[in-house]
Every structure is written in C-alpha cells, then in structure tokens.
Amino acid sequence: MSRIQTVFDKLKQQQRRALIPFFTAGDPSLELTVPLMHAMAAAGADVIELGVPFSDPMADGPTIQRASERALKLGMSLRGVLAMVAEFRRQDNATPVVLMGYGNPIEAMGWGVFAERCAAVGVDGVLTVDFPPEESSEAFEHLQRHGIDPIFLLAPTTEDARIEQVSRLARGYVYYVSLKGVTGAGNLDLSAIEHKIPQLQKHIKLPIGVGFGIRDAATAQAVAKLCDGVVVGSRIVQEIENSTAKNVIANVGALIKELRLAIDQA
Amino acid sequence: MYNYPDSSGHFGQFGGIYMAETLIPAVEELRVQYLRYQNDPEFKAEFAYELKHYVGRPSPIYHAKNWSDRLGGAQIYLKREDLNHTGAHKINNAIGQALLAKRMGKKRVIAETGAGMHGVATATVAARYGMECVVYMGAEDIQRQSPNVYRMKLLGATVVPVTSGSQTLKDACNEAIRDWVTNVESTFYIFGTAAGPHPYPMMVRDFQCVIGNEARVQMPEMIGRQPDAVIACVGGGSNAIGLFHPYIEDTSVQIIGVEAGGHGIASGQHAAPLTSNSPVGVLHGNKVYLIQDENGQIIETHSISAGLDYPGVGPEHCLLRDIGRAQYVAINDDEALAAFHDLCRFEGIIPALESSHALAHAAKIAPGMSRDKVLLVNLSGRGDKDINTVARLSGIAL
C-alpha cells in the first residue's frame, strides 16, 4: 500500500483530517529544507507538499512567487529537490512527500527519468499545476509505471463531466482549489466550498484535500469540517519569509502544531 | 493537405492546453464560442465592417523602390500594417476577440503587452465597445515604451506595471493569467499573439490572416504574380502567421520568419528560440520551443524591441520549422537598428523596431538576388513608439 493511502486510511479510522503543509524547496536555504520537513512531520503534518520552484509560477500569488525566486537564486533545481527527498527518507520512511510545481522542469528532465528517480528517492505523488488531464497522458503513464500517484486539481469552475474524467485518472488524493484565484488569495468562501464538496464526492472516491487561501488556524478548522485534508501553503511560506535561519524551524514547527490542534478540533 | 491544429489544439507535438484547472473550463468555453461564431455570417460581416471602416483596411502594399535600388538586388515590397488604426497589426486580432467577448457577455477585458501595441489595440477596442480594460505591462517595458503607456491611459485603460521576474512580456503574461484565474467569470483575456492555450493560437492566426489574404490579392494586381518570399518578424509570431498562413500551400513562395537575435545568438542574449535550437518546453499554456536552462527554468531574453523580447514562439511556427515549410533566421539589435534608419531615410517611413528585424533580413538577402525577384516584408507596425529608444541609443536626449 502506498504511503499516501496508508496515512489517509489511518486518519479515517481515527476520524481525523489530514494536515498537508506546502513550502518551496530551497527556501529559505538549501540546508534548511530537509530539517523543515522533519520539523513539520514531528509537529503533526500528515503529508508534505514540497514545491519545486519555477521561474514563471503563473498560479501563485506574491508570497510563493517570492519563495520561488529566493530558491532559484540559491541554485535550487528539480534534481536538487529529488536529492532532498532522498535525504529526508533516510530518517523518515512514513511521511508521504508530494512534489508540486509546474511541468517544464519535468519536461526538461524527461518524464521517464523523472518518474524513475521519484520512485528511487521515495517521492509518493506529483502535482503538476499546468498539466490538466488532457495533456497528462505521457506523465500519467510514466508515473503509474513507477507507482507514483498523479495528484490532480479540481476547481470551483470544474463541472461534473470533468470531475468524472479526473476521478478516473487521479490517485492518492484530489486537491480541490478552494477559490478562483492564485495561491494565498484572500477571497476564501466557505459556503461555496461546502456546496462544492458533495458534488465532488459524487464522483471522487479518493480523499479530498482543500487548499489555496487557508490563512490561519480558524480557516483551517472551518475547512477541515468539510473535507479529508487541509493544504496550507502561503501562510507557511510567509512564516518562513518572516523568520531567521535561527528561529525558522521553531516558528514553522509551532505554526504546524497550532494548525494541527485546530484541525483536530474540527 | 495542411490542416492544423487538430481537434485537441495540437500542431503536431506543439500547442495544447497547458493551464491550471481553474482556467480549463474558460478556454473550453472560448473554444466552443469561437467555433460557433467563426463562420457565423453576422459575426464575419461585423468583423469585416470594423476592419474596413474602423481600422482602414485593406492596408496597402508599397514598393520600397529607393531602398531596393540602393540594395541593388531583389525588389522589396512592404505590407503596410503600420497604416492601420493604432499603428500595427495588433488591432486585427483585438477587434476579433472583442467582438467575441461582446457575444459572450464579458464586460471586462484584460491583456498583456510588450511593446504596448497590443495593449493600445486592446484599450482601443475596449473604448470602442464600452468594456472595462486592464493591461499588464512589464515595468522595464513601461520605461522603454512610455508613449504607448500614456496612449492606453488616454483610451481609458488601467495599466498595471509588472515588477516580477524579468519585468518584460513573459512576466506581463504571467500576471494577466493570474488576473484571469481570479476573475474568470467576468473577464475575457484578449491574448495578443498566436500562442497560449488552444484555441488562442488558431483564433489569433485566423483573425490575423486578413494580412496574407489581402496580400494574395494585392501582389498579382501590382506585379502580376505572388512574391518569391514572404518575410515577417517573429516574437510570439502573430503578424508572421497572419501573412504566412495563406501562403503555406503555395510552395512556390518561400516563407521566412525573423527572430530577435539581440546581441547575437552566440552571446546567449537573444530572443530567438527557433534559430538558437532551444529545446521544447511548456509555458503560458502551450508546448513550444522555449529558451530555458538545463533545469527547465526560463531564461531572461534580450531584444532591442520589447515586442520580440519573449522566450517562446507560437506553436504553429514550431511546426512550420519542423516540417521545413518555413525557415527561421535571427537578426541582431544592430542590424535591426540599421534597417530602421534606412527605411526612415530612404522611404520616409518610421518602422517599429520589431518590424525592422524583418526589414533587416530582407536587406541582407536582397543584394544576392536578381532584380526581378520580389520580397514581401510585413511592416507590422510603425515606429513612433520607439523614438525614445532609438534616440537614447544614438546618445540623444529628447
């Protein structure tokens, strides 16, 4: 059984929701990425979404854009991200790691090589923001062959026929983009999420994670009531941005604990 | 028979709809609406009326005889898109998309712009059809194309400076896409070039094909035959595909696209993905040849002309190169600038720096050809917007 499925099965038994933090690999420094992953797992993260920085992050708001720019300036690359996952796995063989980013760095490496390396280093899922199901047949084939879960996005604008189409391809969990906008946007509409999730659940049997625009413990808790997992990205990246190399691990750990507590009380 | 894109929006391996999920229903809706209206007699009649009475089409073809004589070889003819209302070919496409937006009930339009010509065209049609208009423009481009920024403001548009990344056209595209994903229901994205997610490369090409369709009628009227070659500058490549497409099946006519060679291909500072043999990649919704590093990160490009300063190129140009139907070359900044001055002095026409790349290539090959050969160059825009740039390069403060 995959790490992702194991985690969600266990959470389901415990009637808890998943906490899925996102941050950009290589930010604030190459050395701190793996320690941050361990700190997140220790503080209660169930799945870690590790952002692969890209020069043109079209779906991201200013916070994650800046994180990508910082990471790229430090020389972060897809190869480097894979090496970090390998290092993380030396101490943690249970916490699922999902790589999230844009397709071009993977295209440059080649999907076959990429999927093989993902399997070798212990990546569990891959979410490629700008590769919808229509353009994912090559990616899907390679990821499947190596047992990596393709994670797909669904959006407020996604209607039934497409939800059904995604349900046939998706593995691991499905990521519902909670709002029309970029990551970190401020226009979260809880009633719209509440309305949409049952429509998704008609077709999607996998766990549903919700992300974009979840900015604090209160919104995380409110969203957790409606789905199987809560993805928190920009808020964590902001915490990283506002911390120093000395206190970033402690600050992010404390934030994850706060979110964990809020979600478990949902 | 040449028939691209296929029904899924691919030109061979190029093109596609590489967009985030939120926007997929929007591009699908656009595809459906475009297919519905593209052959609708009422839509076609309104488009034709606007092109004739508002833009001033057909644009003439002019024999640049003085310059041709000086070059001493092939005769250079110019398709005068610079004489269009707003001063470039961009208005053809902006009107087509605005008429579609109107039918789709969209009250707000957005656009990206590099040199500002597409921004001006979009601001113009927004004023004409009573729509709210927001134009995204790189902060560096705002500096080098300031007259166009003020034109857009006069026309009632909001110009948003983009300070991320290289602060040029690609970053303006990123920011426009971010706006679209946020305002997808109210907003029509008037994309400026024959690239982006399907159906844009096809739709923009179709609207721009008025250039080549007119030329196919005008050249036989002027010289009794079609030209030996058609030449156009290629950034995203909308003016080029508009001229080239009607000539694709006429294999007696050579097709030459001219990319921005910047400081030279060898310098690495250019905007010529085809000529530099850049690898295939995915950016802004389509798979194309793309200037990038070995890790798949987009590299900052350089060109003297803001409108060509873009790391990718439209998918149909990628295909035309691969199947050998079109040839792509690069002209560097200095060569383009020399052609700019030549056309000013010998023909009394101030060309856009973008179009000057196409002119420079014609000037390069004409002397090696006999005097009865004919080169048709797309003079895609006028150069008034560039006078600050040219003055600065000449050490003159305006």
Image (cartoon, coloured by chain):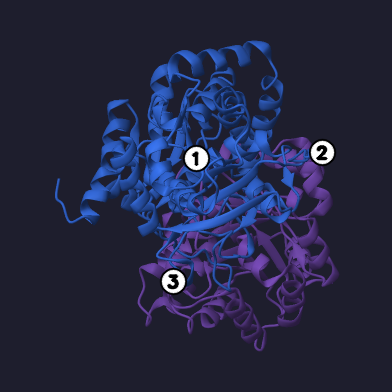
Colour of chain A in the rendered structure image: purple
Residue located beneath label 2 in the image? B1
Residue closest to the far left = B397
The reply to whether dot 2 and dot 3 touch (C-beta < 8 Å) is: no
Which amino acid type corresponds to the residue marked 1 in the rendered image? Gln
Q: Residue at x 47, y 41 (%)?
A: B179
Q: Residues within 10 Å of mark 1 (few under 14, many from 20)?
A: many
Disc with the residue nearer the chain's start (2 vs 3)? 2
Residue closest to the far bottom = A90
Quadrant where the C terminus of chain B is found in the figure: top left
Q: Residues within 10 Å of mark 3 (few under 14, many from 20)?
A: few
Residue located beneath label 1 in the image? B75
The chain containing the residue under callout 2 comes to: B
Disc with the residue nearer the chain's start (2 vs 1)? 2
Q: Residue at x 35, y 77 (%)?
A: A244
Apparent side of residue B175 relative to residue B156 in the rendered image (left or right): right
Local SS, label 1: strand
The chain containing the residue under callout 3 comes to: B
Which amino acid type corresponds to the residue marked 3 in the rendered image? Ser
Q: Position of residue A145 (x, y in %)?
A: 85, 69
Residue located beneath label 3 in the image? B267
Disc with the residue nearer the chain's start (1 vs 3)? 1
Above or below residue B183? Residue B141 is below
Q: Nearer the viewer, residue B107 or B233?
A: B233
